[in-house]
Image (spheres, rainbow, N blue to C red):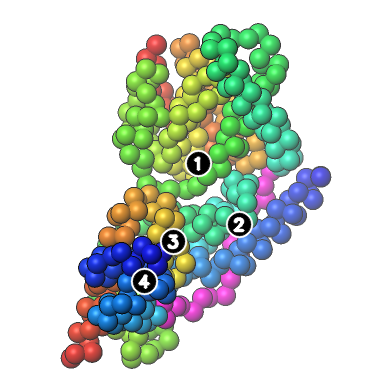
Amino acid sequence: MSQATEMMNCEDYKQALTTDPELGNESGHADTCAECAQYRAEILALDMKIAAAMELSVPELKMPELPELDTAHVVSLSARRSLSKPAWFALAASVLLAVVVGSRFTDPGMEETFGTLEQQVLAHVDHEPMALLPSSTPVSDSRLANAVPNRIATMNRGIGLITFAEFCSINGKDVPHLVIQGERGPITILLMPHEKVAEATTFDGVNIRGVILPVGDGSIAIIGDREEPLEEVQQNVLDSVMWST
Amino acid sequence: MNSNGATGNRRKRFDRLVAVFHGDMFRYAAWLCRDKSIAEDVVQEAMLRAWKSLDALREDSAAKHWLLTIVRRENARYFERRRLETVDIDNLTPSQSALLAEAPNEELDDLREAIFELEDDYREPLVLQVLMGYSTNEIAEHMGLNQGAVLTRLHRARLKLKDITANEVSS
């Protein structure tokens, strides 16, 4: 860092200092410039005062009444994780296979290898926990367009507050992965245009529940908090998404 | 592991995380909403939500970031629900005044008031950097901004506070 600040002019150095006063602890530009050394001292002093002014007395921790979590009739976390890992390795293997063979036809034995679609959906959600952080920041239009390319589907923002959008792969097939913010927390939506299912299937995990809906020649998985009113979300999703093929 | 054992371990993990990070959760919430009573409500809601989604947290080393993200979301939800008006510094509630009256210190009182009056967009990254020790990269990720926007906000926030403190010295 010191080399970087040595090459700065006074204006750049002062600006850098006001964005990150830690720079002031490095040797560099200010060592050879009296004016900037003075400025550095002022900013460091200011930051110490800011830190002191921001300190607050913290009230005693009052633990809220935590609800009992129903773990008796759902797949346990350890069970979920034990199935996630092989499912993920199988998933990675499927991608490799798809690259090597260069084809995307469906292998009849694939379901046996990867587990059911519900298990793969759970494994995929489990694999990207950062996607499930609560957020109030919508993804940009460009990120959304990359995650949901027009060749797969068209959709509008009526689906909800979209805070995560990635282009993923399940079973070697392209799957836009979205997260919207629901009443009870983040809701995962996987658009699976090539995964045809005969009927709606529901499934449970620890604290979560999900549904895979048949939509044309594909399906859409929606997974949220156990208490999330998913039925309302389903309608929004169905109204907002249209396959391109 | 049976269900009771798993639940017990989950509860122990939660208690440990909350004990460590409750202070940061409260300080962050208080500076977000600028009201100590509301901050306590926000933290209570955030703890409930964290408890329900604890399984989404894979590594405890990421707990601080995870919990503060939940606090941020709960604060936004609180204000969405209440649709509270912006704070008028000349017409504060007792709970808002309590934040300014923290540890009376003539030199710091004016600075605390200046921080209180900073626009949300400027105050939040400053709190994350100075109080929570976040890097500018982490602030950008946390707030969903690009790093350039974070640098600009931090720069402007400090210049405002520097001007205010300089004016006080000269007056």
Residues under numbered marks 4 and 1 in contact, where contact means CB atoms less than 8 Å apart: no
State which region is magenta: A50-70
State the CA–CA distance, disc 4 to disc 2.
33 Å
The residue wearing badge 3 is B135
Mark 4, Cα crowd under 10 Å, few <14 / some 14-19 / many 20+, is many
Type of residue at label 3?
Ser
Reply above or below: B148 against B41.
above
- Nearest to viewer (mark 3 / mark 4): 4
Reply above or below: B58 against A93.
below
Type of residue at label 2?
Ser
Residues under numbered marks 2 and 3 in contact, where contact means CB atoms less than 8 Å apart: no
Residue beneath the point at 59% across and 45% down: B56
Asked if badge 4 and badge 1 are on a common chain, one would say yes
Asked if badge 1 and badge 2 are on a common chain, one would say no
Specify the label residue B61 is tagged with: 2
Chain letter for mark 1, please: A
State the CA–CA distance, disc 3 to disc 4.
20 Å
Mark 2, Cα crowd under 10 Å, few <14 / some 14-19 / many 20+, is few
Q: Nearer the viewer, residue A99 or A112?
A: A99
For the residue labelled by badge 3, is the local secondary structure a helix, a strand or a loop? loop
- Nearest to viewer (mark 2 / mark 3): 3
